[in-house]
Image (cartoon, grey):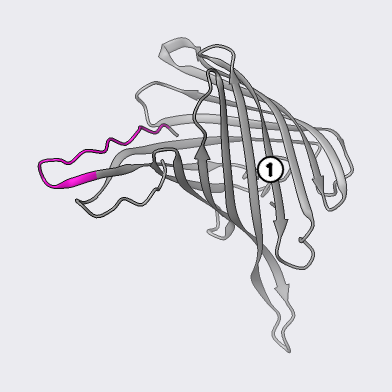
Amino acid sequence: MGLISPVYSQTADSTVQVGTVAGSAGVTHNGISLIPSFSLEQPAAIFNLSLTRGRFSLEPEFTFSWEGKPWYALFWLRYRLPEAGRFRMGLGTHLGLNYISARWPGNRNPRDVILTERYLVGELSPSYALTNRISVGSYMLFARGFDVGNNQLTRFVTLNTVVSDIPLAGKYRLTVVPQVYYLKLYGDRGFYATSSFTVRRPGSPLSLSSLVNKVIRTEIDGSRSFLWNLTLTYSFGKREVVRPFPVPAVPVRGAD
């Protein structure tokens, strides 16, 4: 999501600009998880919001099946370290809620219910810009659940390359992000390759993206050999968040 830096100055109507807000809403024929070896295996809707101030951001994400059932909800808090030349580093943490459909036996009346699994997650995202359009980096995610059956540490580590702003016909631009990653889940390990492709036209709020994921070698149950999807996204935002001056500004930024 594109974000702009806030400007901190008193305006004529006695307000002070605190930050920015941006977001997106997308629909896909196959919802794929943050860890792309897992999917909903049905259409999904994805909603993202980013509230930004300075180097901090609050970035909630909500996903639902096409039937309206919740899939997962993430509440990210992120911080971008000051850039050191071409090197960049991001830190983040979130509370994750994963929703699972289950059959509740009851006494005499079995019924379908939705159970919630809770996770605490941390992330590191170092990158190095080779040119204005090409960067290389890594993404490291560590998660631990709070509930029985999911309280082991999950490790997700990627090596990636970002190639952006590739010119196409009709002023369209392509961004390609190939990755290889390692996943350790409940003691089992797996190696995978994944790539995302995003096409957009500058000035348009719409973009079309696809993600493909392929198993290289895995011991993890539930990993599909090959996954892919198409997603249509509408992006909005870059609106200023304001509070009456001189109220102190509070720092806010913008699986299966």
- At label 1, which amino acid type do we have? Leu
Residue 47 locus on image (x, y percent):
48, 47
Which image quadrant is residue 90 in?
Answer: top right
Q: Most prominent secondary structure in the magenta stretch?
A: loop
User: The N terminus lies in which quarter of the figure?
Assistant: top left
Residue located beneath label 1 in the image = 141
Of residues 14 and 230, the one drawn nearer to the viewer in this rendering: 14
Q: Does 250 appear above or below 239?
A: below
Residue at 41 percent of width and 13 percent of height? 171
Q: Circle 1: is it few (<14), some (14-19), or many (20+) Cα within 10 Å?
A: some
Q: Does 18 appear above or below 157?
A: below
Which image quadrant is residue 98 in?
Answer: bottom right
Q: In the drawing, does residue 143 fall left or right of residue 45?
A: right
Residue at 10 percent of width and 41 percent of height? 12
Report the residue that reaches farthest toward the left: 12
Residue 116 locus on image (x, y percent):
64, 66
Q: Does 68 appear above or below 129?
A: below
Q: Which residues are magenta?
A: 2-16
Residue 63 locus on image (x, y percent):
55, 51
Residue at 79 percent of width and 57 percent of height? 152
Residue at 69 percent of width and 38 percent of height? 140
Instruction: Check residue 18 for magenta coloring.
Output: no
Asked which secondary structure carries label 1, the reply is strand
Instruction: Check residue 15 for magenta coloring.
Output: yes
Of residues 28 and 248, the one drawn nearer to the viewer in this rendering: 248
